[in-house]
Amino acid sequence: MIRAGVIGAGGMGAVHIKNLYENEFVQLSAICDVNAELAKQQAELYGADYYTDSSKMLEESTLDVLYVCIPPFCHGDIEEQAAAKGIHLMVEKPLGLDADSVRHKAKVIADSGIIAASGYCLRYLDTVAIAKEYLKDKKIGMVRAHYVTTPVPTPWWRKKELSGGQLVEQSTHTLDLVRYLCGDITQLYANMSLLLMNDIPDLDIPDVGAIQFVLDSGAVGHMQTGFIQFDHRSGIEIMGRDFRVILDGTTVSIVDKDKEIVYRSKSNFYRNLTNALIDAIRTGNRDLILATYEDGYKTLEATLAANTSAETGQPVKLR
Ligand SMILES: NC(=O)c1ccc[n+]([C@@H]2O[C@H](COP(=O)([O-])OP(=O)(O)OC[C@H]3O[C@@H](n4cnc5c(N)ncnc54)[C@H](O)[C@@H]3O)[C@@H](O)[C@H]2O)c1
């Protein structure tokens, strides 16, 4: 059995806790949250030990894998502590808010040899797999992406110093899929503003943003991000000569001159992520991890670069 621990039992932590509990190869050993009541409630529900201090949990429990499901501003050195103990990791996106510190963590993780996944769960969609397979030998010319939705009620999400803003914290999923399906971003330029939602208390993050980017293949792209709507829409249109692949939410359409094929997803992408990670740990097959910690770092770097571009008015080149 793979002994699992989870730090952060809030909205996302609770989903991962349930999926871990339901995996036949997992023993859910320990749950930690600074909110003692929440930690205790989740631990009692699933028969795990509970903690309010993550260092104490890492000292006292014997774990094979640790899920880090806390907001990006408070990771501290949890990843380094886990890597030093040889505990495999699943770290929720965004991996942090400072590129240098996350790059340092990525190096510590790589040197330790542990398996480390990031929480870019949409990579585990069946429809994303279909898109990736179709695109594997295609030349892409242009990408149009969007993530436009409603405001998130979580208090820390509204503060730039705590969440990094919507692109870093939320729309990052769509920019990550652009990277996964189309290649790395080498240059970008962004405009962002807080224009319409400034009556929400304690909110200082841009509610509209437009990012123009260049991919390593030379393809060009554009993405809109915002939370000025009453419903959620996200998607990507990837165009080459005489074809396009459209991801609309979790549905994918492949369109060329002669036909249009539509696939609707049947995946539970959160469960797929956990099952893939547990199988990777059991078998040692790292190829099962579709979004590594390193992948998460590269996507974080692109979203932070977009923030820098919006602040300075200058384009930013990425490594
Ligand atoms: N992959 C996805 O689709 C997805 C969806 C939602 C959230 N997330 C990510 O998951 C992370 C958590 O988001 P959330 O929505 O669950 O937030 P949340 O505020 O609902 O929950 C976070 C929990 O972490 C706890 N916490 C904070 N600091 C802690 C610490 N040092 N030690 C232990 N517990 C601590 C809080 O008490 C809270 O219960 C964020 O990075 C977010 O971006 C990912």
Image (spheres, rainbow, N blue to C red):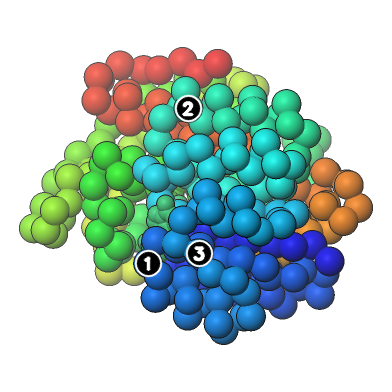
Furthest residue in direction left, as rendered: 199
Using the image as rendered, state which of residue 174 and residue 57 is in the foreground: 57
Using the image as rendered, state which of residue 183 and residue 82 is in the foreground: 82
Snapshot quadrant of residue 84: top right
- Answer few, some or many: residues within 10 Å of disc 3's Cα (few below 14, many 20 plus, some between 14 and 19): many
Kindly identify the amino acid type of the residue bearing the numbered disc 1. Asn
The residue drawn where x is 70% and y is 41% is 85
Q: Is residue 236 visible?
A: no
Using the image as rendered, state which of residue 262 and residue 92 is in the foreground: 92
- Answer few, some or many: residues within 10 Å of disc 2's Cα (few below 14, many 20 plus, some between 14 and 19): some
The residue drawn where x is 53% and y is 69% is 50
Judging by the rendered image, the residue that carries numbered circle 1 is: 35
Q: Is residue 33 left or right of residue 106?
A: left
CA gap, disc 1 to disc 2? 26 Å
SS at mark 2 in the image: helix
Snapshot quadrant of residue 73: top left
Say which label, 1 or 2, has the lower sequence index. Answer: 1
Judging by the rendered image, the residue that carries numbered circle 2 is: 101
